[in-house]
């Protein structure tokens, strides 16, 4: 059924795309010569795109961690030029909390070929793993039967 003028309740199924379970930064936006620079670029992008002032983000990180996190430190963590200010893991987690940007975790996980996904997808992944195991065992059973029955 075609969408009529002024109709806001009917979706165009041909333009719908499924959501990405593992969100990541566009590679061209965070590509850098070193891992440290890549992380700095990711931090800068997350801070820019979260829609909050850096002062508010710094305050939320401080509240979450129970320690001070000044805005100028956020600026230093986001700067590739400030090589003496690499973000500590605890503050990185505070930044993830304050920005709610899952892509920050993904940039770390992808270094190991892993993905960060919402927990709601875990049952679907478990089902896929079990389906793979069932297929593997079915094939092994068929081979065992073939061998046991003398190839018949």
Image (cartoon, rainbow, N blue to C red):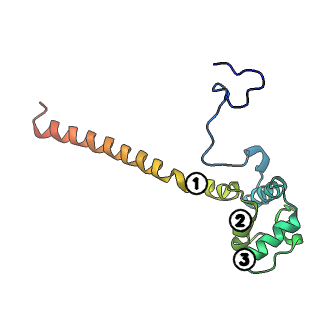
In terms of sequence position, does the residue under pointer 2 or pointer 3 come before the other? 3
- Numbered tag placed on residue 97 in the rendering: 2
Q: Which residue is mark 1?
A: 118
Badge 1: how crowded within 10 Å, few (<14), some, or many (20+)?
A: few
What distance separates the C-alpha of mark 2 from that of mark 3? 10 Å
Q: Is residue 29 above or below residue 79?
A: above
Identify which residue, 93 or 13, lies in the foreground: 13
Q: Is residue 89 left or right of residue 74?
A: left
Q: Quadrant of the N terminus?
A: top right
Q: Residue 99, which numbered label? A: none
Q: Position of residue 56 (x, y in %)?
A: 85, 67
Classed neighbour count for the residue bearing mark 3: other residues with Cα under 10 Å, few (<14), some (14–19), many (≥20): some
Q: Residue at x 73, y 26 (%)?
A: 7
Whole-percent x and y of residue 57? Answer: 82, 66
Residue at far top of view: 2
Q: Decide if residue 28 is on the left or right side of residue 102.
A: right
Find residue 112 and report its horizontal and vertical position in percent: 58, 56
Q: Mark 3 sits on what residue? A: 65
Question: Mark 1 or mark 2, which has the lower sequence index?
Answer: 2
Image quadrant in which you'd find residue 99: bottom right
Q: CA distance from mark 1 to mark 2?
A: 14 Å
Tags 1 and 3 touching, CB below 8 Å: no
Instruction: Kindly state the secondary structure of the residue where label 3 is placed.
Output: helix
The residue lying toward the viewer, choosing from 59 and 140, is: 59
Do tag 2 and tag 3 residues touch (Cβ < 8 Å)? no
Local crowd size for mark 2, using a 10 Å CA cut-off: few (<14), some (14–19), many (≥20): some
């Amino acid at each position: 059924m075609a969408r009529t003028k002024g109709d806001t309740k009917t979706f165009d199924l041909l333009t719908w795309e499924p959501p990405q379970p593992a969100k990541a930064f566009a590679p061209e936006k965070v590509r850098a010569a070193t891992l440290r620079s890549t992380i700095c670029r990711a931090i800068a992008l997350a801070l820019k795109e979260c829609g909050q002032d850096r002062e508010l983000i710094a305050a939320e990180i401080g509240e979450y961690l129970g320690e001070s996190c000044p805005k100028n430190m956020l600026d230093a963590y986001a700067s590739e030029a400030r090589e003496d200010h690499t973000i500590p893991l605890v503050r990185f987690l505070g930044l993830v909390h304050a920005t709610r940007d899952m892509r920050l975790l993904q940039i770390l996980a992808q270094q190991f070929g892993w993905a960060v996904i919402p927990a709601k997808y875990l049952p679907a992944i478990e089902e896929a793993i079990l389906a793979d195991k069932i297929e593997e065992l079915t094939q092994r059973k068929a081979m065992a039967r073939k061998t046991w029955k003398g190839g018949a």
